[in-house]
Image (cartoon, rainbow, N blue to C red):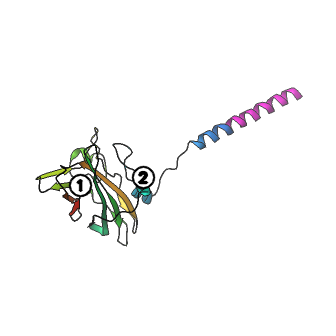
Amino acid sequence: MNVRYATMTRRGMAAVAIASVALFVAGCGAEEKPGTDKARATTGAPKSGGATTQGSQAAEEPREPLAVLKGQEGLELTVTLAERDAGGFLTVKGTLRNTGSGSAVLSGQVRGDETEVIKHGNSLGGATLVDALGKKRYYVLRDTDGRPLTTTGLSILPAGETAAVFMQFPAPPASTTDVSFQLPTFEPATLKLS
């Protein structure tokens, strides 16, 4: 009887030890999932397609604004960068801020009206650059699945909150030094390219 009790006790202790290790391992791999509108509003950069994330933007020095565009419901887009890269792209970065007293809902118009872009949800895919000198309009780039290379997932921005945003376009020729930036529901602005 004593041996049987000792065997059952050892088996029980072993089961508890295994369960504890399994829970510990499962807990180490867990990630926090954003569950608030604030978290959704401030995380917008896609994880693929050459996009930069907010973490890398936070490490950058604050830049002098190139333009400030007023939008609906107290939304304000401050463009801080319009830069060409060696790959033939032009990246526009900035901050979207809700200057109003209540939560602002981003209009569906900011994603544009192209079917490929619309089917991928909320984005800034409706943004365009107009090169008046070269008489060309540039649209936000898409990846091979039709997803726009821009901040996605923005829908509601609470009062006083900001979200880092970006958009990638084909780069205009080197002779083009400024373009008109347009985003539906926002005022247009002229951007100096670097």
In percent of width and height, residue 98 lies at 35, 67
Q: Would you say the residues marked 2 and 1 are in contact, meaning their CB atoms lie under 8 Å apart?
A: no
Q: Which is nearer the N-term, disc 2 or disc 1?
A: 2
Residue range corresponding to the magenta coloring:
1-19
Res. 117 visible in picture = yes
Q: Nearer the viewer, residue 103 or 12?
A: 103
In percent of width and height, residue 182 lies at 21, 59
Q: Quadrant of residue 158?
A: bottom left
Badge 1 local density, few (<14 within 10 Å), some, or many (20+)? many
Position of residue 142 relative to residue 40, above or below, is above
Q: Which residue is mark 2?
A: 56
The residue lying at 26 percent from left, 53 percent from top is 111
Position of residue 38 relative to residue 32, above or below, is below
Q: Which residue is mark 1?
A: 127
User: Regarding mark 2 in the picture, which secondary structure is present there?
Assistant: helix
Farthest residue to the right: give it: 2
In percent of width and height, residue 129 lies at 20, 55
The residue lying at 81 percent from left, 28 percent from top is 7
Q: Quadrant of residue 76?
A: bottom left
The residue lying at 38 percent from left, 60 percent from top is 163
In percent of width and height, residue 107 lies at 27, 60
Res. 1 visible in picture = no
Position of residue 27 relative to residue 107, above or below, is above
Dot 1 amino acid type: Ala
Q: State whether the magenta stretch is mostly helix, strand or loop.
A: helix
Q: Is residue 74 left or right of residue 2?
A: left
Which quadrant, please, contains the N terminus?
top right
Q: Is residue 158 left or right of residue 138?
A: right
Farthest residue to the bottom: give it: 101
Which quadrant, please, contains the C terminus?
bottom left
Q: Is residue 37 left or right of residue 104?
A: right
